[in-house]
Each structure stands twice: as C-alpha cells, then as structure tokens.
Amino acid sequence: MKTSLKKKVMSITAVSTITIGMLVGANWHSSTVKAKPHQNNGNVKNVIFMVPDGYSASYATSYRWYKGEESAMDSMLVGMHRTYSADTEVTDSAAAGTAMATGVKTNNGMISTSPEGKKLKTILQAAEDAGKSSGLVATSTITHATPAVFASNVASRADEANIAPQLLENDVDVILGGGKKYFPNSLLKKAEKDGYEIVSERNDLKKKNKAKKMIGLFAEEGMAPELDRDEKKQPSLAEMTDSALKTLNKDKDGFFLMIEGSQIDWAGHAHDAAWAMKDSQAFEEAVEKALDFAKKDKKTLIVIAGDHDTGGMSVGGYGEYDAKIEVLRDVTATGDFMASQINANKSNIKEIVKKYTTLDLSNDEIEKVKTADKPSIAINEIVSEHALVGWTSTQHTGVDIPLYAFGPSADLFAGLHENTDLPGLMAKAMKIKFKQTK
Ligand SMILES: [Zn+2]
C-alpha cells in the first residue's frame, strides 16, 4: 500500500517537474530536471529538521519564479502533510509545531502540552535521551512557538519568559536566534557555568568554532528581516546553520537540529510578498548549507516542512491570467521599513516607495497609503497587486503543505501525511525510542 502510493507520488512529481521545464524552458535559466537524491538504506545518525514557517505550495511556486529557476527544495519534494489542529481546521504555529515535535494534535496556542494539559515528550528530548546532541536555530525569538515546542512545555505560547529556562533544562546544546530579552543575566551566567559559549554578534559566532555548547542571541526581540538585516551585526540563517552544524557534529552519537525560517510567516501576515521571497531565499541558503553537510556526511537525514500556509497567498490574481513575481526582485526593503521612512506630513510617500521598489505610485495609490491605518500594509498590498500576488487572509489558512526530504530514509516521508506523523518517522529513521506515555 505504502510502496505503491510512494511510487505514484514520485512519478507525478517527476512528470510535473519535466512539464514545467518544457513549458517555460525558453526563459528559464536552468530548467534541467535534477536526479532524485533519495536513498532508501543507510543509517541515520543525524536529523536536520527545517521549518520554513508559513511556506505553502504558493510560496514554493512564487519563490521558483522569483529565483528564476528551481529551488534547492524542489528536487527534494516527497509528499504533503495535513496541518489542522485539535480545535480548528486552521492551525497556529504552536499547535502545528507541537504536532511536528510530539506527534500529538493540540489546541492552537499550546506548546507541547496536550489539550488536557499534559506535558508531551518531544523528538528533541527523545534524541537527547538516546545520547545525541540537539540544537534550535530561528530568526524569531528562540522562545517563539516553533522552536519552543521542541524543548519546552507551557500552556500558552505567550509565556516566552518561562520557555527560555526550559530550553536549558532540556539540555539543548545549540541555541541561536533572537530573544535576548527572555534570557536574564542570571540565566546566562548559569549557562556559562554549564559550559555554554555565549555570543551576541555575527563576528563572535564565527570565532567560537571550538565550542561544544553555544547560545547566540543576536537581537532583543526577533532578528531583522533578511531585506533589512545589518550584515555586520546579525548573522544570516545560513551562517547560523553552519555554526550549529560545526558545533553539533562534535558529538559522535549524532544530533537532532531544528532550523526555522521564522519570518516567511511574518511576511505573509503583513502581505509583504517581497519580504516573503527574500526570507525564502535566506531559508534556501540555509538548506544548501544543510545539503552540503548531508552529502558529505551520508548519515544525515534532512526533512523540510512548512507548518501551515500564511495569508492564503495566490500565484496570480486580480482577475488576470498572469503573475509578475519579477516585480518583487526590485524591492530592497520591507513595507515596515518603508513606512518608517515616511515623514510627518506624509509628503514623501511617492519618493520612498520609488526608492525601495522602483514602482511609480499613482495618485490613488499614494492616497491609499496616506489614509491607511497601517501604511506598511497598504504599501505591501500595492506592491503585491503590481506583482499579481493575491492574499485572502491576514492569518493562516488550512491547505496541505509540501514535504521535502533528503538522505537515508527520505522515502519514509513520501505520500500525504498528518503533521503528527513526522516525529515518529524521524525517530524510526534514527532508530531511537519515541513514545508518548498514556
Ligand atoms: Zn503565523
């Protein structure tokens, strides 16, 4: 049953990839169909689980047009997964993350806690129990819902102050992201005593390559969107991935590492299509680092799964048979940044938007930004309309989400899964014990 389903899914993938290549081959820079890199056999020592938050099929398609060729994720596609939570068809990141970390559907807002309030065991904890090292990397606060679900149990995702100490109690060896404000000095001092190297700037991160345990907190709150990032101060997601892999690879028993591209989701909530694409690119660069590592190591399984769709993005819209994603390549700042540059009497909207998007706004469009409650969203929606990117919600939607895998046991992930299947499959691949106690 499983085998035939798997074969079917894989052949559909291959055919559709070839079709896309033939249809638009003329203006496609590199339309070659890459060989499927899946291997059935071989031991899995390490698992790298990568979560592009909010990345649905629409984002994957848009990103392919934005890049102008297939993404690194495209050749790893193996299936889809269903994302609904215990209490609604449309999950949030806490319930979706809990499902992917513990194998249990819970209510929106809850962090690795069952709807009845029971603490749930996570795949990261199971890997730790098996003697492996573990790491969490994100561009949000590292106590945000998606990283939090792997190494803490709290009733509400808002309780980030209580999540921070739990990450250390659970012995997470590498902690990289934003959220310095949730780590008081007393906690960091204790961590240092326990053998952690503490870093807070990009350059320090590179220097600490002898560390076995590391905490890198590069912003008080979330890190900067990739479009607005100060490259001297904050590392990229790819750089954090590289450091995490170098640090964790010192454990001969292997590791479990979760890496989140957190802000693809934030961009979706803000209807900022250019931010979504730029952060998808930053995520892809992290995937390439992971792939380089896995290809050399040969005992590393990479699994990539967005947790849900954000914004109900469409490819094309506004009644037209067209999509103009290339418009987004010229955008060099987020809508939030552009809105912050508008002067008090709002007389420079046209210049600001021209400077950071190359678009010439009409008088109607300028008026829309001027009178908007949130000028940033108004700018983002105007840019989206020029790119023919549609949005149907400022929250998440409940569509099925693409699932990608590479390395030994990648085939386990073929087909249409529940999001709750993922941690069990990762445990099976690593041959470690992973069971919720009743
Ligand atoms: Zn979200």
Image: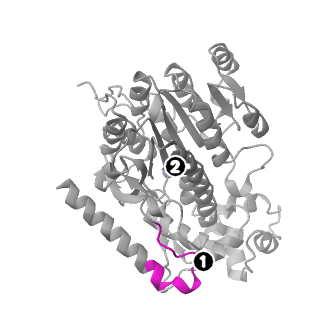
Q: Where is residue 22 shown, x and y percent of the image?
A: 46, 83
Q: Is residue 114 above or below residue 263?
A: above
Q: Where is residue 411 shown, x and y percent of the image?
A: 33, 52
Which residue is tagged 1? 29
Q: Where is residue 373 shown, x and y percent of the image?
A: 64, 61
Disc 2 element:
helix
**The N terminus: image quadrant:** bottom left
Which residue is tagged 2? 295
Q: Residue 165's quadrant in the figure?
A: top right
Disc 1 element:
loop
Inspect the image, locate mark 1, and give the three-letter code of the amino acid beneath it: His
Whether 42 is among the magenta residues is: no
Q: What stretch is highlighted in magenta?
A: 20-34
Marks 2 and 1 in Cβ contact (< 8 Å): no
**The C terminus: image quadrant:** top left
Q: Residue furthest left?
A: 1
Residue at the location (54% across, 70% down)? 64
State the CA–CA distance, disc 2 to disc 1.
25 Å
First in residue order: circle 2 vs circle 1:
1
Horizontal arrangement in the rendering, residue 81 relative to residue 159 (left or right):
left
Whether 25 is among the magenta residues is: yes
Which of the two residues, 144 or 306, is positioned nearer the viewer here?
Answer: 306
Q: Is residue 111 above or below residue 27?
A: above
Q: Where is residue 144 shown, x and y percent of the image?
A: 54, 38
User: Is disc 1 surrounded by few (<14), some (14 to 19) or many (20+) residues within 10 Å?
Assistant: few
* Residue 108 is at least partly visible in this image: no
Inspect the image, locate mark 2, and give the three-letter code of the amino acid beneath it: Lys
Q: Is the image coloured rainbow, by chain, by secondary structure, or in one colour?
A: one colour
- Residue at disc 1, CB closer than 8 Å to ligand 1: no
